[in-house]
Each structure stands twice: as structure tokens, then as C-alpha cells.
Amino acid sequence: MHKYLQLQNELETLIESLSYRDGDRLPSIRELASRYQCSKSTVIRTLDELEKRHLIYSVDRSGYYVVKKQRKIQPADTSVIDFATSAPDPDLFPYVDFQHCINKAIETYKNDLFIYGTTQGLPSLIAVIAKLLGNHQVFTDPGNIFITSGVQQALSLLCILPFQNGKETILIEQPSYHLFIESLQVRKHPVVGIKRTAQGIDLEELESIFRTGEIKFFYTMPRYHSPLGTTYSRKDKQRIVELAQQYDVYIVEDDYMADLEHDSKADPLFTYDRFSRTIYLKSYSKIIFPGLRLGVAVIPDALKDSFNQHKRLMDIDSSMLSQAALEIYLKSGMFERHKQKIRSSYQRRSNLLMASLNHFATNEEHLFTFQPFAYPGIHTHIVLNDSIPVPAVINQLKKYSILVDATDKNYLVGFPQENILKLNVSYAKEAVIEQGIEVLMDVLRRMHR
């Protein structure tokens, strides 16, 4: 990330801190350059950007001052410890940045945003996304990229359109994305499950299902799986792609948390696919804010025309205003800055959660099992002792204003379920994570006794 973008993050955090009041003067340009070990020109560029965003204002021959805030920054609410919610933290939403991008989009595109667009998406946005996907080792022609109204729309379309292999059954990991499971069951799509644990999936079982199950596509979240939080090894990814080719099965790869990746060597399944069998899905709603409702689908040539036709019949196009604003947000460097900010925040929370669970896993082996991750995301899970029912744990923790969740809705009806307790950190404030886990362990001890 560029130095001035890092400095923007630092100064924005400084401005929003409780130590600064409305109208307070910021340190001088010289002081800031010395403190952050950068050039004066970098500081000036950063201050100009913050002024454009109405966070500060300048006074000739005096300096820069904090603008009166639209809302007072309050200490984080620690009355409820929320390990249940998996949505992005509203405190990290880029309100000011995106408001600027919306205004700029209207100014730039004018009437073009308020008429029907193209089914595939705003061409200029697609060109930007094609370059950014390369950062995730997803190299594709812009003609294969579709902008969708979130990943959920892409999944709905893929379920109904016919595939070249002529098969109909969908294979899905268990547990998995609860809304997709509900959609499959409500619409009565043929679907089967394959068990996934902290160790991954049984590749021999996967081969058996591919060989005999008439599988249309295999839906998977290779990294930062929801709700487990696990990531496949490179060897497993390569084998999954090989099996898909061998048995004429497509893969639908939901890489919704790609932007949280810390391991530079971690590539998606798409990277290993030399046969154009992987449909790559990515969400911007999960990393920016849910209301954006924009996702990306990379569709192979064999399915492109059919996908385009079905999408046109479903919604004509995804929101043009959102697309134009996202294009400006991505091109300006604001997204890169936000991504760094949210990734750092979630990493701190995840590390606190992992450390707490590791501590108790060593000393409380009889209560639960836990698999630590080298690169944790926002999700993780623990498997409770069979004598401790998850619903009872949830009810007990509510008495202490601690929210956790079960995995019932993450399973197909009738599929054998493990005694799993989900733990998410996107809504849990750093200051109370360790406290929440201590209370959880105390409840588990009493229930086990």
C-alpha cells in the first residue's frame, strides 16, 4: 500500500480518537513528517485528501484543524459481547469515502446511471476489477466477468441454468453457507452434502461422489470457510481441481473473504484450474458494507452466454449507481486503504480469540476440541464435548449478555451434525474478547460437571 494511504489511516484514527476534540489543531507538517518518517510532500498530499473528505480544515499560516464531527465518537459498547454476528462491523464502514464516490459517480456519469445498463455490468468497472483479480491470481478476460447483486444472485443463477455436463445434482460442504442451503431446499434443487471438518474433506469420499453422484457442480469455500473458518491446503486444492476434470464436474468457488488474506502464497482453486471448470465468485459487500450488494462472477466461456441470458431475465442489470461508485472507490486507492484498515482490525480480534482458545484448549481438553489456524479470518469454531448441548450453552451465555450461535442452519436437513459452536469476531470488540471466552469456559465447566 502507498505510504500516503497508510498515513491517511494513521491520521484518520488519530482524528477520530477520544483525545481530539472538535477544532483541535493537528501537529505541524514538519512534526508529522518526522513522526511517521515520510516526506513533507507525502504529509501535504495526505492532509489535502483529508480536507477534501471534510475531516479537517486548514487556516493560512496556522495549520490544520479537526472538523466538527457529525457524530460523537463514543467508547465501544461492551455491555454485549457478540460472537454470533458474522456481518462486517459498522464501526469500520467507509461512510465518508463512499459518500464522496457516490457524488463523484453522479457527477461523472450523470444520466447513464439512471437508465438501464448492461447485463454483464459497467464496462469501466469490469476493466478495473479484471486488474484487481490478478492480485488474487485470478487471471481472466474481462468478457468472462459479470457484476452480480451479491454472491447470492450468482449462486441462484448457476443453480437454474443448464451446464455442459448435463448433470443436475449440487454437492455442498457440510456445514456451509446457510442462505445457499435454504435456497437449495426451498427450490427443491437436487443436492447432497460432504462432511467438512477442521482437517478439510475426505478426498476419497469426494472422488466417490464425483464418480457416482451425477454432480453438476461442487460449491466450496476453500479459504476462510463459513462457519468453520478453515482453509484448504495447496495439495487439497490441486487434488479437488484434478478430480473435477476427471469426472466432468464444475467447481463453484466462493472466495468471499479473499481480501482478508495474509498469506501471500495462498492462491484460490481458480489458479490451479487449467480446464476452465472453476467458476470464481467474490463479494465486495462483505469487505465494504452489506448494503452495497455487489459481487463478481468469473464465468467460463462454455457457460457465459447462458449466464448472461438468465441474468438479463432476472434483473436486467445490477445497480448502476453502486457500480459507478465502486469503480471510483477502487481506482482512487480508497479501497486499498480501507482493506488494510479492516484487515488489521479483524486480525487483531482473531489473534485475541485464537490465543484465548489455545490457552483453554490446553487446560480444558475434556470440554472441547479446537484447531488453531495459521492465518485466521473472522470465523472459527469449537467442537464441544458430547455431554454439553450447544442450545443450552447459547441460553446460558445470554444471561451474561454474550451472544454465540449454533450451526443448525448451516446443514442440509437430515445431514449428521457435529456439536459445533460458532465464534465470529467481526462484531466482537477487542477489549472484551478475552473476557467473553473466559465466561464461555466457565459455563462449559459447570455444564460438564
Image (cartoon, grey):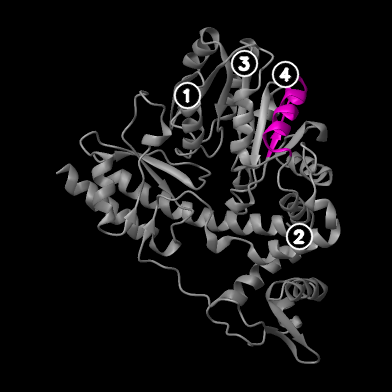
Q: Secondary structure at mark 1?
A: strand
**Disc 4 from disc 1: Cα separation:** 22 Å
The residue lying at 84 percent from left, 58 percent from top is: 110
In the drawing, what numbered circle is on residue 249? 3
Q: Earlier in the sequence, mark 1 or mark 2?
A: 2
> Magenta segment, which residues?
296-316
In the drawing, what numbered circle is on residue 2? 2
Report if residue 97 lies within the magenta region: no
Depth check: give the residue in front, 278 or 384: 278
Q: Earlier in the sequence, mark 4 or mark 3?
A: 3
Residue 303 rendering spot, x and y as whole percentages: 73, 22
Q: Secondary structure at mark 2?
A: loop
In the drawing, what numbered circle is on residue 201? 1
- Residue 98 is left or right of residue 76, and the answer is right
**Disc 3 from disc 2: Cα separation:** 42 Å
**Disc 1 from disc 3: Cα separation:** 17 Å
Depth check: give the residue in front, 309 or 283: 309
Q: Earlier in the sequence, mark 1 or mark 3?
A: 1
Q: Earlier in the sequence, mark 3 or mark 2?
A: 2
Query: Which marked residue is nearer to the observer: mark 4 or mark 2?
Result: 4
In the drawing, what numbered circle is on residue 275? 4
Residue 38 rendering spot, x and y as whole percentages: 76, 71
Q: Neighbour class for label 3 at 10 Å: few (<14), some, many (≥20)?
A: many
Looking at the picture, which amino acid does disc 1 mark?
Ile
Query: Which marked residue is nearer to the observer: mark 3 or mark 2?
Result: 3
Q: Are marks 3 and 2 in contact (CB under 8 Å)?
A: no
The residue lying at 48 percent from left, 40 percent from top is: 229
The residue lying at 55 percent from left, 10 percent from top is: 214
Looking at the picture, which amino acid does disc 3 mark?
Val
